[in-house]
Structure formats: structure tokens, C-alpha cells
Amino acid sequence: MKRKPEVAVVMGSDSDLPIMNEAMSILREFGIFYEVKIASAHRSPALTVNFAKCAEKKGIKVIIAGAGGAAHLAGVIASHTALPVVGVPIETKALKGVDSLFSTVQMPSGIPVATMAIGKAGACNAAILAAEILGINDAKLKNKLKLFKKKLADAVTLKNKKLGH
Amino acid sequence: MKRKPEVAVVMGSDSDLPIMNEAMSILREFGIFYEVKIASAHRSPALTVNFAKCAEKKGIKVIIAGAGGAAHLAGVIASHTALPVVGVPIETKALKGVDSLFSTVQMPSGIPVATMAIGKAGACNAAILAAEILGINDAKLKNKLKLFKKKLADAVTLKNKKLGH
Amino acid sequence: MKRKPEVAVVMGSDSDLPIMNEAMSILREFGIFYEVKIASAHRSPALTVNFAKCAEKKGIKVIIAGAGGAAHLAGVIASHTALPVVGVPIETKALKGVDSLFSTVQMPSGIPVATMAIGKAGACNAAILAAEILGINDAKLKNKLKLFKKKLADAVTLKNKKLGH
Amino acid sequence: MKRKPEVAVVMGSDSDLPIMNEAMSILREFGIFYEVKIASAHRSPALTVNFAKCAEKKGIKVIIAGAGGAAHLAGVIASHTALPVVGVPIETKALKGVDSLFSTVQMPSGIPVATMAIGKAGACNAAILAAEILGINDAKLKNKLKLFKKKLADAVTLKNKKLGH
Amino acid sequence: MKRKPEVAVVMGSDSDLPIMNEAMSILREFGIFYEVKIASAHRSPALTVNFAKCAEKKGIKVIIAGAGGAAHLAGVIASHTALPVVGVPIETKALKGVDSLFSTVQMPSGIPVATMAIGKAGACNAAILAAEILGINDAKLKNKLKLFKKKLADAVTLKNKKLGH
Amino acid sequence: MKRKPEVAVVMGSDSDLPIMNEAMSILREFGIFYEVKIASAHRSPALTVNFAKCAEKKGIKVIIAGAGGAAHLAGVIASHTALPVVGVPIETKALKGVDSLFSTVQMPSGIPVATMAIGKAGACNAAILAAEILGINDAKLKNKLKLFKKKLADAVTLKNKKLGH
Amino acid sequence: MKRKPEVAVVMGSDSDLPIMNEAMSILREFGIFYEVKIASAHRSPALTVNFAKCAEKKGIKVIIAGAGGAAHLAGVIASHTALPVVGVPIETKALKGVDSLFSTVQMPSGIPVATMAIGKAGACNAAILAAEILGINDAKLKNKLKLFKKKLADAVTLKNKKLGH
Amino acid sequence: MKRKPEVAVVMGSDSDLPIMNEAMSILREFGIFYEVKIASAHRSPALTVNFAKCAEKKGIKVIIAGAGGAAHLAGVIASHTALPVVGVPIETKALKGVDSLFSTVQMPSGIPVATMAIGKAGACNAAILAAEILGINDAKLKNKLKLFKKKLADAVTLKNKKLGH
């Protein structure tokens, strides 16, 4: 595992940890070193802006940001960096994450946020996307990704065997 | 009309002017002095944060912010000030402003945005709400508000007369 | 704590108390005196209209109204007063509060309702907005608000420390 | 045609007339005498409450109310009368009448509003429902209704003939 | 209690009974005699059509129909009778009753269904609407309705007293 | 072209013809003989039920039904026949066909409607599905289908060539 | 029961089995032989494409495909075969299956997917639709279908008797 | 400009060109060489799968895929490659692109699609995200990105000057 973190996993609240752990678990599986940060776009704006501005200098290459409701975290970070920012909409009690999804994905021209599915699948995929991005210039990581994808297919084959087909 | 602006009308893009003009027109009707600002939460984050931090010192008492899509403007401003922030969701092409509404209204505990209706009615009402807020300590303005509300009712009575009732 | 209530917390039914208690708890935290009222726009219209008409005379400066479904309470109150009215959409069983949100926020030109998020976060924020409004002319309250916002940020910093960052 | 109006057609604004004319046209077709009223739940609340309270004494038997956005008109009227109230959700610019529909139909236990489809079909059907209600005790009107329904079916048969079937 | 049923309460499945019991309970409270019928627009179309065609002759004056999903029951009945038909959209597992609501309320010009709120409140209100309709020509029933509405208001007053206000 | 119609194309109103013509055009392309019928589930229920009951005896094998709003047509037909029924949700003015889609697709256990996309693409695909169904036992038709699918792919290849790739 | 499977029941994940079992149970009830397959459009694309291309040769006549979220399974299969493909949208945690429904039903011109209701009712109906399709050329199966539909109606009659009507 | 394309811009139909041109225009602005491809997941599945499998070998590093309705294109491509895939949901006539958005973003664990906003803003941002991804290992491109972001902020400053502030 590399020493210096290449990916930052940021979330609006520590209550998002059960979701965002999916991302960290995948990052560990791929041997990608990461840092974790609680940073609320609204409750701790200075900390958030500061994090976004300094991420590149610290060696971060991809930022994963998870937030729910009026989910501004990924967008606020994206407005302060030229690094790719991946947004994970967290499910909410009333609107079930549609609010989080729209707040994350409907970014204006100029400031993209790479938006994932709502919830755990999205957190998991944010890490895989980070691996795909880093894999462009890392043959070893790309091989891990191909193996990972092969395992997904093999698992389906295995399940069919269990069904007796 | 007072010299120093008490209300700031901020919007994400000058394409929002036709909507936000509704607010300014009402503010003028109430004799409330205001300043106008283009400030994009995403394209000009430094300008936006700077505006939000300095608004109170400049004498601003209420901030009206209009934005569309992943409408973070009102929320970003609210995170940097203790002034009341009124959000106007601007209609969007595809999602018709539901995205703007959810991004503006679904703020987390701690950072309120007083959200208005989507579009022109919302911009108009943002200014009336500002007048209601300022009117708490301004008897003259409160009287204007009561007169304004009376005129709304009188207009309905007049329309009934035109119908011949 | 001041003797005379400056804020009224109104709700359509006593079943809304667990939500609206969030608002009262914040008001107490800020030392703002408030009164509580059950007033249904539909089941007790006379009581509701009467409350709205008399609120200003009683010294109320901001009205917080929580209701669910075809949530007319905040709008009906706003139509009878020149005070700022803050609406809290209560979550509903089937439509999850989208009905409450649309019924509260989509007010016509002339009669604003300052709409908050659906549910507890909205109730909490309604009280903070009330504090922001009252804080315009109350330096002590404004300081409390700034301290409150600082505490929100400090709590995030603390959570990061717990994560070992 | 009867002299005294049995149905009242109320709407929040005269801009709703093109929609609500559908109702009046059907009422005339059935020979039901009606009165028309502009009454905004928000802009002219006193007029609206007064209308609702006096409708029964004036001989009104069914009230049709059309409104858009945070459409409180039908609900506010229903809260002040024991007459059946029929609600017509008017289409809105941004939310296309979903807001009007939810605000009209999601009434709490105790205060029903008989909600129709959004827009012209709803206005037309509000009048037919009024005719069905009045027809319970009016054999002549009931016959007209049956003839009306037969004509609807005959028109379909005719269209099939035109298609050459 | 009158011998001959004046209201029919129809539902698509006996699984809708817990919801539709709210309607029956109110009808009993008002002393309105009713009949109950399971009739699926889709699984028992002949029975449903037959019921709709014969309801008037049996003395039924108002039909209440509850159904969920692609909720065609109220519409199918309305297409075969000139009686007022009240529709209650039943909540569904996935779409939470939005499907039921749209299928019930969006009727084409010519065939109204008086649509109530989704679920129990809607079932309860369907019965109150039936009472309001029958009350047009039944002074005793109208008085009961006024008393019922007064009780709703009194209950709110009582709740306020319990709050100590 | 076969003499006796194997497919029936039914629609709620002749205003649906511009949409449903897409289906007829495809059926002609495949040499499938069809009949066209205007049949409203609500305005001409007897005609609709009669059509559904007699379709099989007339030699119809697949029924295509297009309707909008509270779109009950396909469901009503399906409740009276054991033939496969294909539903085409027609776009509506306010709700844009979401009402039509939910009313068509959310059928209860026991009575399927094979639902297509909203609007023209759905009408076109209804005819292709009919061809696929009839093609199970018609090798010639199946070949036409394969050729049709090949043409779709060839058209894409051609478009790429035009782009200069 | 026939030896060679005529229907294939495919699903994106074995976690969909509790839903898709509804389809298999109905197929067994009708004596239709089927095969079951786990095939993810995304995790095992080669297996899925291969299955779709070979289904016809193996004697499969109808394919039932259940998937949730960005539910591409039915569409991907339909793009590789001229057999009728029936899609069952599986309910999802956050969006409750609206995502699955839209991803399954909104197919472009040329490639139909016969879409069923979300969840168990949809899975059940997918099997009935398959029976209706196979029943076009199988008089015995068609009789079973008619009996099945009669039983549905009889069950309703029985339930009415239990209610004492 | 580099000779060999590093980005592929794929779309489901040439009717998507007016939207996807936004992406190409930005790519040219950043001096990123790209190839354009029409590839329908449904109408030309073989071409699509073939493209996805060969993209990496051809030197493509990022794939941008735009599609509407049951928008499977990005997902199908992502299932056949370990390259990062960016999805642009194209607006649709009836559902306004909500169908495209849900079909693109709600991918299952294992196969991410980096989803952008609906329509032109999304297409534009897809190209910027591609630049951000390629910029991780290309200092010159990263500088261009920072200049681009600075220009966005400068444009806002200029607009404020025009407003006279």
C-alpha cells in the first residue's frame, strides 16, 4: 500500500460513515491509500474550502464526497479545485435521496461532479471510479480492476451453478 | 428612499435577472434600498464567500439569493453569515425547478434558508418577506405592508365587480 | 429569558409535537420566549384566523407554523398578518412530505411563507431563522447566533480529531 | 333555467377563467344556475371566509373551487361550510399542477375536498359531478345526465364509423 | 338508522378493508346505512359492471370506491352510472399511492371521480363527503355534520388547554 | 397481407391517432393485418367491454391499446380477455404521461398489461412486440423481424460513416 | 409438464429470487416448463449477451427479465433477440423502483420490452403474460388461462359472501 | 493537438449531436483529441460492445456517453471496459430526462458511471471532467483547467461591473 493518500473520502457528517465505509473498503481492496475527512459545506464551510484548496498540493488525485439533502458538499469542493470530484448522494428520511441526487448531479456548466447512485452502491462505485481514473496511468491497478470485474462475472456464473443450471 | 442598502439581491447568473427583477421591483415599491450582485457559488466561489462574510458589516440585514439546478448559492451564503437568507429557486429546463427547490430548501439542521416558490412568484415574495422582516422594527414599513395586503384584497373585490357580481 | 413571547410556534395537530419540539428546544437555547398553539387551518379555522389576526398585537414578531399533507396552516396565517411566517412541512405517510412541501412553499405572489426543510431539520432551522430575524436588532442574540455557528464548525473539527485526522 | 344559483364557481384569480369556463359551460348545458366568484384564499381571505360561511344560506348546494400552486382555496372554503366542495387543481408553470393537485387532494381527516383532474378536464368534470350530486333528488336533471353520458358513447360510435369500421 | 343503504362502499380487495373501515365507521357515526362490496375492476369485471349498473335502482345515492395501483375501480364504476362516485386511492408498496392517486383523479372530461387523499384520511373523508352530499336534502343530517365540524374545532381548543394555553 | 386482422389497435380517443399511427405503420411494414377501434373505457364502456369479449372469436391474437391520463383502457380490455394486451401510455398536458404510465403499468396480480414507453416510441414498439409475439409461430415473420433489427444496426453504421469514422 | 423450457426467467442477482419466484410459481401452475438464469447486464455482460443470442435456438419462446435500479437487463437481452422480452422492475431501497420502472419501460423505437408492475405483482403478471402469448397457439393453455381468470372472479364472489352480502 | 484520440464521445443517436457538441467544443478548447461514435445500446448492440472492448487498446482513456430514455449506453459500455465512463443523460419529450438520469446514475455496485447533469450543461461538464481526469498526469492540461476556472470567475466579476456594482 502506498504511503501518501491519493484519494480523499469526505462526508458531511459522521452519520454518513456507514455508507462511505463502502468506498473505503473498496479502496483498501485495490490498495489505494486514502484519507477520511468530515467536512460540512454548511456547518464548517471554512474547513471545507480549506480542504478543497489544499487537496492537490497534498497529493490527492481524486476526491470522493458524500452528502445528503441539499447536498452541496461535492459541488462546493469542485468549485475550489481542478481535481475530479466524485459525488455520492446519501439517502434522506423524507425524500429518500432524490433531493441529494438532484443537488449533486445538476451542476452548472463549468463545474462537474461525477455523480454516483444513491447510497451504498454509489459509495462503492465512487471508489471503483477512483480506481479506474488512477488506473489510466497505473498498469498494476488496471490489472486489479480487470481481475475485479472478472470476479464479478465469475460470481454470477457460480450463482447459476448453485441454481443447478 | 434610504441611502445604505438593507437588502442584497444575489443571483447565480445574469440570466436570472428577468426573474430576480420581480424582487427588486417590490423592494423599490416598499422604498427599501438594495444592492444587486452576480455571484455564482460554483463559478466564483471566492467572490461569493467574500460577499457573504462582509454583508453584515456593510449594513445588509436580509439577503435574497436566486439560483437554479444544483442551487447551492443561498446555502453557501447562509453558511457564512448570521443574517437571514431568503432563497428563490429558479426554474430549470429539464427538471422545471424541482432540482432548484430541493437544493435550496432541504438544508441541514443549523443553517436555514427561507425558501420561496419556484420562479417569479418566489422572487416577488422574497422581497415581501424581506419587508416583513424589516417591518418588525419599522412601523412605517409595516404600514406600507398592511396597505399592500389591503390592495391585494381590493384588487380581488374589483375583479368581482367586473364580473358583474 | 424575556417574559413576553416574541415567537409563536403553531402546529396543525398535537401529533406534530415531536417534530415541532425541535424548534422550541432551539428557541429555549437562544433564550427566546415563545408560545405554543395547536391550530388547524381546516378543523379549527376560526381559532386559526383569530390567532393570526391578533399575533402582532400580542407582541409576536415571528410565527413558525408546522403542518402536513395539504399543509395550508402557514399560508392561511400569512394571509391574515404582516408578520414573517416560517413554514415547516411535516412528513406524511404516503407522499413523505412532498405534499406538505409543495403546499407550503408554492405560495402565490403577495403572500410569502419562509419554507424550511421537511421534518425535524426544518423545525430546528425555523427557530434559527427566527433568531436570525430577531438578531437583526438584537446584538446579544446575534452574538449567540455566531457562537452557535462556531460551535457547529467546532463539532466538525472534533469529529475529525476522533477519526484520527 | 332556475333563478337562484345552486352552484358557486369560485377561483383564486381571474387568470383561471379560461379553465373554469369549462365548468360554467357544462352547468349551462345542464340548465344549472350558478354564480361566479373571484376569491383568493391568500390575497382576499376575509372575502373568501365570508363567501364560504354564507353560501349555504344563499341557497348554494355545491361549491366548485379552482386554484393553482399552494392551492388552499377549496380547503379553506371546505373548512367553513358543510356543503360539498369540489376542487379543481389549476396547472402551474414550473410544477405543472402537481403542486395544485397535492395541495387540493391531501386534505386531513374531517374536511374533504372532492378533487378533480388537473386543468380543463377537471373543471368540466367538476360541473358534471355537481350535476350528479344535484341529480340525486332531481329526476329531470338525472335524465339529462344519462342523455349526456349516452351522447359521449354515441360520439365514440360515430368516430368509429368515420374510421370505416 | 335507515333500513335501505344509501351509500355503497366498494373496494378492490379485502386487503383494503383496514383502510375502508374508516369510511364505514364515519357512515355509522352519521347514521347513514351502507352496503359493502368487494369488486375488482380487473379480477371480477362482470360483477363490478353489474354492481355499477344496478346501484341506482337499489336506492344507492353515493358510491365510495377504494383501490390501489392502477386503480381503475372508481373510474370503471363511474363509467356505468350517473351517481356521484367518490374515489379513495389506497397506498401501494412501491409507489406509495401516487400511482393510485393519478389513476383515480386524472379522469377524462365527461366522467368525474371525486378523489380523496391517499389512505385512511381519504377513506374517512369519502364518508364525510357522502354525508355532505346527502345532507343537501336532509336537514337532520346537515345538523349532524355541523355538530361534527364543531367537535373537530372543540377538540383543537381542548388540546390547547392541555398544553396550558 | 393476410385478410383477417390478427392485431387490434384500440385507442381512447381519435386525438390519439397521431401517436397510434406509429403502431399501424409498423404493422403494415411487417405485413400484419390489423383493425382500428376508438373505444373509451369511460365514455363508451359497453362498446369497450363488447370489443374485448369478442376479440378472440374474431381471430384477433394481440390487442394494442393506447390511452392517456387515468388510462384504464388497456386494463379494462385485459380484464375481459385472455389475449395478450399491450398498453401504450399517451402523453398528457399537465403530468406529461406519468399518470398514463402508472395507470397502465401498475396492474394487480392476475391481469397483466404489457406496457410500452410513453408516446410515439411506445406505439411503434407495441407493434414490434406484436410482431415478436406472432413471430413465435411464424418463421417468415420472424425473419422479417431479424431483418428489421439488422436494418436498425446498419442505419447506425451508416450514420457513423457520415460522421467520417 | 413439457420437457423443454419455453420460458426463461432471468434476473440480475440472486437477491431478486424472492420476487421472481412469483413468476416461476405461476408458470408451474400453468404447466409451462422454464429455465432460471442469473445474468447481470453489468457484472456478467458476456454471459447475458450469450444467453440472449442463444435463447431462441434452445427453444425459448418468451424471456422474462427482472432487474432493479438502472435496470438494463431486459433491454440488453431485447437488443440481442427477436423473442418477446417481458421486463419486471424490481423495487429499490431509495427510489422504490421508479428508477427500475423508467429504465425498463422507456425503451427507444425498435426494441420493445413488455413492462410489468414494480415488484411481486409484476413478476406474477410476467408469467401470466407469457401464458397468454403461448396460449395464442395452444388451446389447452388458453383454457387454463380462462379457468384461472374465472377463479380470480370466483374468489371475489366468495369474499363478498364472507362479508355477508 | 495530440494526434491519437484520448477521449471517445459516444451517443445513442445522431439526434443527440446538438447536445453532445457541447462536449466536443470543450475538448477542442482544451486541446484534447477525441473520436465521435454513434452507438446505440439497443439498435446496434454488437457495434457498442465491440467499441467498448477495443477502446482501451486504441488509446482511449476516458469515454463520454450520452443517451436518453432507458439510457443504457453508458452502463453497457462500462460493463465492458475498465476505463472511466462518463454518462450524459439526454432530455426526453415526456419525462424530461428524469428517465435518462435514473437509467444512467442508478448503476449497481461494481460498475460505476460518472453521471453529469441532464442536457447541455451535462455534456459540457463531461468534457471538463475528462480534462480533470487527464490533467492528473498532465501539468499543462491542469494549468489550462485552472485558467478555465479563473475565466469563469472573471466573467462573473465582469458581469457585476456591467451592473454598475
Image (tube, coloured by chain):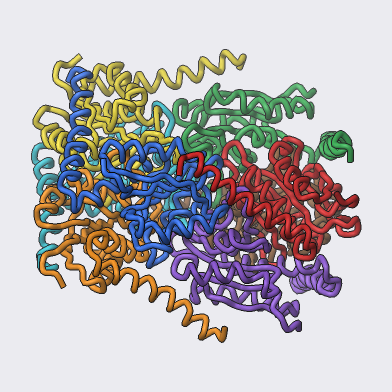
Chain colours: A green, B cyan, C yellow, D orange, E blue, F purple, G red, H brown
Q: Is residue E96 left or right of residue G92?
A: left
Q: Is residue H32 visible?
A: no
Quarter of image, res C65:
top left
Q: Which of these two is toward me, A93 or E4?
A: E4
Instruction: Give the residue drawn at x 48%, y 46%.
Output: E38
Q: Is residue A14 left or right of residue D80?
A: right
The quadrant the C terminus of chain B occupies is bottom left
Q: Which of these two is toward me, F23 or B149?
A: F23
Q: Is residue B56 above or below residue E163?
A: below
Q: Is residue B104 visible?
A: yes
Q: Is residue C68 left or right of residue C82?
A: right
Where residue G13 sits: x, y (%)?
75, 39
Where residue C10 sits: x, y (%)?
24, 29
Instruction: Give the residue drawn at x 23%, y 54%.
Output: B25
Instruction: Give the residue drawn at x 21%, y 36%.
Output: E148
Where residue F21 sits: x, y (%)?
60, 77
Q: Is residue D83 above or below residue A100?
A: below
Q: Is residue E61 above or below residue C113?
A: below
